[in-house]
Image: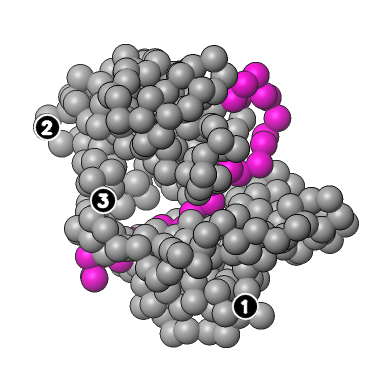
Amino acid sequence: MKIVNNDLNTRVGKRRKKNKFWKIFWTVIAVIVVGLGGVVAYEYNNLKNAANTAYRSGGLSDAENGSKSSVLNNSKPIAILLMGTDTGALGRTYKGRTDSIMVAVLNPKTKKTTLVSFERDMQVNLPDYPENSPSKLNAAYAYGNAKELAKVLKKYFNIPINAYVLINMGGLKTIINKVGGVDITPNLSFTYEGYTFTKGEKTHMDGAKALAYSRMRYDDPEGDYGRQKRQRQILAALMKKAESATTLLNTSFISSLSKQVQTDMTFSDMTSLAKNYLAAAKNLESDYTHGTGYMQDGVSYQNISTAERQRISNLIRKAMGLKTKKVS
């Protein structure tokens, strides 16, 4: 989130809201994957090639609710691990840790999406890397990719993961420039990396400025939670800008997007997702792990209690139509 609680005690209970971002997200997915609006064969092939470029097997084991293909083919609730990393940001070239870690459960039967954010500073032991344990949750991807992070989430929360999507937050700079920038109304005033932002003042941002806006952390009263809010602002603005047919059929934009997204979902998987899971966008339930900050050996961690891990486990498993299980 010395001992710090980040005012989490004042933010009790689940957050429920209909989120315009997800409506836009699904609109974009539908247009890109299904080819709505009469996409010609040439552009359709470009979209398919872009999906193939983004594909990387994550090595995820079949979850208790079935394999990814079985889940998608039978329109069962699916749990997707969403990760945002920093590769390429500020000149970085290494793989990077995951700054944002979320699990999205899409349930076409209940017509609901459940989105849970996980505290990246949670102290964990890595199943395949005991020599690097204890560590932070966001280190799991750096050591063992999506496979290791999925294992950690299963170990501590007893939840299945069917697929993953990795977004290069640093690469958003290029993507935002491709769409001509985004319009953002800052939710607080601050100066960061040479850019000044004024609360409530609508601002047009190019890629560099938008990245600076989304990265500031220490001057935000909400700390990392505040930064996550600003990251979601940027993504929502980008999705809104990208929903026009002109942008979606722009080969340069599609190429840039495919280079900044990595997933173990094939083009066929994405097609099934778009065709059979759009109903899940009707309602969104969002939540996050509540933690307490502490220091150990000079490193700051977040402690997520057993009771809190059980609460999150129950929430996700219920969203997937699975029986609850006791967390370790």
Q: Residues within 10 Å of mark 3 (few under 14, many from 20)?
A: some
Can you see residue 46? Answer: no
Q: Is residue 170 left or right of residue 239?
A: right
Q: Residue 98 falls in which quadrant of the image?
A: top right
Q: Residue 210 falls in which quadrant of the image?
A: top left
Q: How is the image coloured?
A: one colour
Residue identifier under label 3: 19
Instruction: Look at the numbered disc 3 and give the secondary structure of its residue.
Output: loop
Which amino acid type corresponds to the residue marked 2 in the rendered image?
Answer: Gly
Residue depicted at 37% across the width and 18% down the height: 205
Nearest to the observer: residue 101 or residue 302: 302
Of the two numbered discs 2 and 1 in the rendering, the one whose residue sits closer to the viewer:
1
Residue depicted at 25% across the width and 32% down the height: 240
Residue identifier under label 2: 37
On the image, the x and y values in percent for residue 178 come to 36, 16
On the image, the x and y values in percent for residue 186 come to 36, 31
Which amino acid type corresponds to the residue marked 1 in the rendered image?
Answer: Thr
Highlighted magenta segment, given as a residue range: 88-111
Q: Residue 97: say if magenta.
A: yes
Q: Which image quarter is the N terminus in?
A: bottom right
Gap between marks 3 and 1 measured at Cα: 30 Å
Residue identifier under label 1: 306
Instruction: Look at the numbered disc 2 and give the secondary structure of its residue.
Output: loop
Gap between marks 3 and 2 measured at Cα: 25 Å
Instruction: Look at the numbered disc 1 and give the secondary structure of its residue.
Output: helix
